[in-house]
Each structure stands twice: as structure tokens, then as C-alpha cells.
Amino acid sequence: MSGSFNQAVETDVLARARAGERAAQARLYEYFATSVHTLARRLLVKPELAEDALQDTFVEVMRGLSGFRGEAPVGMWIRRIAVNCCLMQLRSPWQRHRAALPPEDDVAPLGGGSGRGSEAWQDLLDVERALEELPQAARAVVWLHDVEGYTHDEIAQCMHATPSFSKSQLARAYARLRRWANPETDEKLCTPALNN
């Protein structure tokens, strides 16, 4: 689960924000904008989509703030709204069309090093690229399950699917990531042993 969504918000800031005070609402935005943007960037990959999700999230937060009952910490409530906004973008026919278009920026092929930075930094960049190569639904399930700590039932509810959909997406994503990490092992597993 993202620790940044767990941060405490002063009771008076939340009360004033719920009452419609702009300065308190801006303060609430400052608390969580980076966390929402990071989550959106991981789920949606493209920076412009993450910006859209950030804006959509806080529009929904401000609309629903007066009805926020406080049954969960405000950060977890905002996280749920952010996830829903990201998933709505992934389900959008317009976004699926845009995802089919060629990428706008040049990204080195998977596993291709550029020689910059430390080996650990390069490994992180390679993992980021591998995640970007996953289909949108699989990437969203991996992020929600492994990083955000959602259960398959919760993911299914968010994606309007079944828990088995979430489980199968996760299994397929893991298989693709394993193939990316160990292409030689994958060739041995996938190629029938004809020379034995």
C-alpha cells in the first residue's frame, strides 16, 4: 500500500475543506497531489493521461468532500477515487484508440542499456519499461495488487470484472515479466526438447 496516502491530515484542515474553504481545499490538494499523480503515472504510463487523472480525481474529491463520512482515512478515500478515475480512462474507447497509436517519445527497447547511471538505476528503468510493455489491464492489476495492496475481489469490483479476471491478468503479467527477465529460460521452457 502506498505510504503517502496514509499521511495524517489535520482535523481542522479537513473540516474547513469540507465546509468549502478554498485555502483548506488547496492544502488537501498539496497533501495528496504527488501521490495521486504517481499512482496515475504507474497505471496509465503516459504523463498526459496521468495529468488528466490527477485533475479528474481532485474534481471528484472536491465534489464529494462535503459527503465524506470519515469511515476511512481521507487519503485512502482519495486513493480509491484516483484508482477509479484511472480505470475509467483505461476503459474509455478514446483512450484505447490513443493507446493503439505509435508512441510519441522514443523509448529504448527492453533490456537495452544506455550506459547511464548505476546498474541499480538501470535495472529500475528496465523494470519500468517492462511494466510499460504490459497491456493496460494487466499493468493496472499488477500495480493495484502488488503495490497498492488491493485484493483480487477489490480489483474485480473496481474493474467491473470477476476475481478470476484479476487473477488471470496477474498470472499473465507475471509470465510476461518472467520472460522479459529471463529470455533464455523462457526459450528452454517454451521450446520442445527435440534433441533428446
Image (tube, helix red, strand yellow):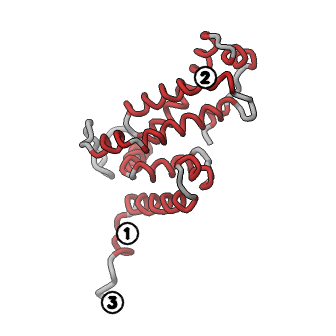
- Asked if labels 2 and 3 touch by Cβ distance under 8 angstroms, the answer is no
Q: What type is the residue that disc 1 sits on?
A: Asp
- Asked if labels 1 and 2 touch by Cβ distance under 8 angstroms, the answer is no
Residue under label 1, please give it.
Answer: 186
Q: Point out the residue furthest to the bottom here.
A: 196
Q: Callout 2: helix, strand or loop?
A: helix
Tell me which corner region of the image, top left, top right, bottom left or bottom right, holds residue 18.
top right
> What is the CA distance from the residue labelled 2 to the residue labelled 1?
44 Å
Near-viewer residue (67 or 58): 67
Q: Callout 3: helix, strand or loop?
A: loop
Q: What type is the residue that disc 2 sits on?
A: Tyr
Residue under label 3, please give it.
Answer: 196
Give the numbered dot on residue 31. Answer: 2
Q: Nearer the viewer, mark 2 or mark 1?
A: 2
Place of residue 191 in the rendered image (x, y in percent of width and height, measured from the top left) = 32, 77
Mark 1 residue crowding within 10 angstroms, few (<14) / some (14–19) / many (20+): some
